[in-house]
Amino acid sequence: MPRLDCRPCLLLLISTCAIAAAQNDSLEVGPHAQALHDSALVVDTHADTPQRFLERGFDIGSADPHDKGQISLDKVRAGNLGAEFFSIWVDPQTTPPANYAKQAFDLIDSVYQQAAHHPDRMTMAFSVADIERAHQEKKFAALMGIEGGHAIQNGLGLLRDFYRIGVRYMTLSWSNTNEWADSSGDINDPKVQHHNGLTDFGKQVVLEMNRLGMMVDISHVADKTFWDAIAVSKAPVIASHSSARALTSAPRNMTDDMLRAVAKNNGVVMVNFYAGFVDEDFLKAEAAQSKAREGAVQEALAKQKAEGKKPEYMDVEPIEERWLGRIPRPPLKSLIDHIDHIAKVAGIDHVGLGSDFDGVSGALPQGINSAADLPKITQALVDRGYKDEDIRKILGGNLLRVMREVERVSQQIEETPSN
């Protein structure tokens, strides 16, 4: 029997593995991409780090090399992240409805405390001018967005209060339908009372946000809620952390018709980095384990309640991380495909970055482990042939344009005499 020569196959295997590695964790950022990234004003519209501030006393100035968090002052400096919208997310599973607003105020205070502790490196920002000023001063700009309209407890007064203390966008719903906006998270649950989109009060909320100058965020919402918000809003809307449903079928993602509607509205879709929103295989694997994973979470919450402890998100996070860690992380290419798709369908002026850092239990594409890895996205866009000026738009320019227009519409409404 002749002996087979396996050397060509072995060489091919080695070559294939090397190419795969180069496309993933070891993606090299070249001089041009690095210089482009370092000169851009990079804006990310969603990070759940306030949960770490409030529940674990995390210091954003920490230089602990063992910290698994995705946001710290060292990491944002390494990745040239100029501005971050910190998520003010009130967990409806662990917070009594009467305490929604209080929990939101506590989370907001936690962001202010971080800025106060690091005045030489970090500053609160409330406008495009503030972001640009912070960039010139080489300081990290901290902004805030409420994730889930349940936080306003059905009150326009609370909405105004949140704006006064710095909140600059609000996601109309989280994964739970509230009393005035349907969510994509439970839209198929027959036990939940739905409203066929936005109620009349929900439409008032959108209009009041326009008047205040607070960006209307349509991530998380049910499809009908999206279309109602687009029809009602007098200002551009944002999707603070959503990806493309044409590529990954998660209902949290946006259809091509929605992408085109956001473009017509002059808004922007900020691409979510979560593996389950940018990779279909990960999404299916996540769905297969969801019942067991949720059971483990509920068991942990029940144990905390039985022991008289207040259930907290940060106690659930390690459980989610262990389960999701069993699923292979998708390649960075999956994330870039979503940016590319939205740029092609909606247009280059209508796509940006909405990472969901510190809120995805470590389930990120290969090579993206923290804000320090953001230059890899710039390199990947350079590799796909994007022009420098268009990459700058994706990195932050598009969001700043939308925010500036929301500010203009607010001023115009204030200056228009009422009948």
Image (tube, rainbow, N blue to C red):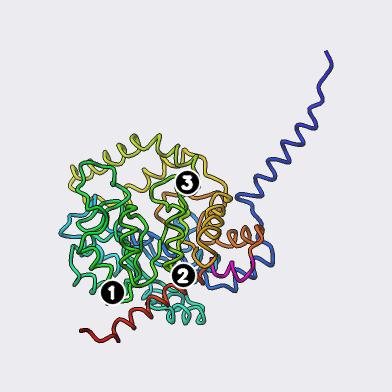
State which quarter of the image contains the C terminus: bottom left
State which quarter of the image contains the N terminus: top right
The type of residue carrying mark 2 is: Leu
Q: Residue at 32% across / 71% down in the picture?
A: 167
Q: Residue at 42% across / 61% down in the picture?
A: 261
Q: Splitting the image into 4 quarters, where does residue 117 fall?
A: bottom left
Q: Position of residue 195 (x, y in %)?
A: 22, 53
Magenta span includes 232: no
Of mark 3 and mark 2, the one earlier in the sequence is: 3
Residue 54 shown left or right of residue 329 in the figure: left
Residue 230 shown left or right of residue 151 in the figure: right
Of mark 3 and mark 1, the one earlier in the sequence is: 1
Label 3 Cα neighbours within 10 Å, binned few <14 / some 14-19 / many ≥20: many
Q: Position of residue 178 (x, y in %)?
A: 22, 55
Query: Which segment is the magenta one?
Result: 387-394
Q: Splitting the image into 4 quarters, where does residue 125 fall?
A: bottom left
Of mark 1 and mark 2, the one earlier in the sequence is: 1
The type of residue carrying mark 1 is: Tyr
| Residue underneath mark 1 | 163
The numbered dot on residue 360 is: none
Tag 3's secondary structure?
Answer: loop
Tag 2's secondary structure?
Answer: helix
Magenta region, mostly helix, strand or loop?
A: helix
Label 1 Cα neighbours within 10 Å, binned few <14 / some 14-19 / many ≥20: many
Is the Cβ of the residue at disc 3 closer than 8 Å to that at disc 1? no
Residue 97 shown left or right of residue 76 in the figure: left
